[in-house]
Image (tube, grey):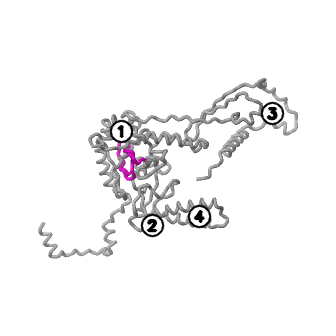
Amino acid sequence: MGTDSPPQFGIRFRMAAILALLLTSCPGPKPANPEASRLGTPTTAPAPTATPTPLPEAFIPSSRMETARLFNGMEVHSRVTAVEGAPAVVERKTPGAYLLDLEVKVQVPKAAQSLEELAGADPSIGSVLPGLKDELPAATVSNFYHGLYQLKVEAVNRTLARLDQMVSRHNFFDCNTILELRNPNTNRKALLIQSDMDVNTDGSDADRLSDVDGSPANFQPFTSYRWPKKTNRPNQFIPEREEKMKQLQSEYDAKSTTPERKKLLKEQMEQLQREVTDLKKYSFLIAKADPYVVLPGFMFRQPNHPFQPKLGDYVVVIYQGKLYPALLGDVGPSYKIGEASLRICNQLDPRSNPYNRPASDLNVTYIVFPGSAEDPPGPPDLEKLHERCAALLNEIGGYTGELWAWEDNLAKPAPSPQESISSRGDASPPGSVTPTATPSPAAAAASSAF
């Protein structure tokens, strides 16, 4: 990430760019007869100019509005209003005489609550979850939903001075609802969330995979869901952090380093040391291998909330009539929602990658089962994940359609028979005949019993 430039510099730069564009697109006047001018011969008389616009004889109040759209999708209505004031010697010292009055108007969406409103985002939701029709009348809009949009508005407020950093229209309207469901027969609780799906590429686990792609811009080798390492295989992301710490320590020890800079360097080294310690001690989910979803951080900081989710809880993702088992595996920014591991994203859309989400519309439904996490944490057991999610869905009224069965794409393929023989070192030479072993008397007796 680059260093932010002062707003004044950005404004002056844009004004200079616009002025340059105007100047280059408005060349100066050309002679009426360029050839005659070059030869020095008399030119024809210039055409009469248009009648000039009469100059005003007094101040005329005015107001003019322009409409534009920022790159982040926000529509901008700008208006210049001119009114007569005091003499310039006075107005130059009056702050309000030359004023930009910035007001952002936001329509916070109402949460979808009825089956009809949910079907507006996902038409198949009622048939995939047939128990919804009985549970929705008693369901309530979660205060997680209201908290999410409150945090979005606060994020907009924080970035008013930097419109380029303001929450995009896409991310502001990224949640259609968060409902609290409770099945009256089983008492099973669930959070129903409708959102889009962004791609998460985080996580590493040297015990299961020694080479993780760490090239995506926002990649981190950690996930919030973790467990103690089971082998002594070193994590591939440790050396680069240790090398960075050496560089920072060298700068810290230099006599020319200022106290302010030393303070910053110390904080960076301490952070890197914490990361190295975690990478040596823990294993994490792997985005390309493990099906997991991400929820905003504030949802995990409500210890007394009856529907508080926890890392490791089971989740079912519903998209276009299919259901995908997952774990709640990571914590994301508190003002955004709708994110899943690359494994899930590739299943929804094979073209998805760290920079291309599989679903931009709010047509992904996440069913989170609070309190379903199991101890101790560990690498996902994909067969058990399928069984538990099927059982939990049945506890909220059942499901129709296909509940996806994930395959372990980290499992080593079973060796072929020929490879097995070669690995034992007893393969016969080409063209030879492998002798048939003579069974022992005990084995012969055992085989004759069948």
Q: Indicate the secondary structure of the residue bearing disc 3.
A: loop
Q: Amino acid at mark 3?
A: Ala
Label drawn at residue 32: 3
Residue tagged 2? 234
Task: Name above or below for residue 62 compared with residue 345.
Answer: above
User: Label 4 to label 2, Cα distance in Å?
Assistant: 23 Å
N-term-proximal mark, 4 vs 2: 2
Query: Quarter holding the C terminus?
Result: bottom left
Foreground: 170 or 27? 170
Instruction: Please identify the quarter of the rendering in which residue 186 is found.
Output: top left
N-term-proximal mark, 3 vs 4: 3
Q: Which residues are magenta?
A: 302-327
N-term-proximal mark, 3 vs 1: 3
Find out whether the residues at labels 4 and 2 contact each other: C-beta distance under 8 Å: no
Q: Amino acid at mark 2?
A: Pro
Label drawn at residue 125: 1
Q: Position of residue 389 (x, y in %)?
A: 32, 49
At label 2, counting other C-alpha atoms closer than 10 Å, the crowd grade (few under 14, some 14-19, many 20 or more) is some
User: Label 3 to label 1, Cα distance in Å?
Assistant: 73 Å
At label 4, counting other C-alpha atoms closer than 10 Å, the crowd grade (few under 14, some 14-19, many 20 or more) is some
Label drawn at residue 83: none
Label drawn at residue 248: 4
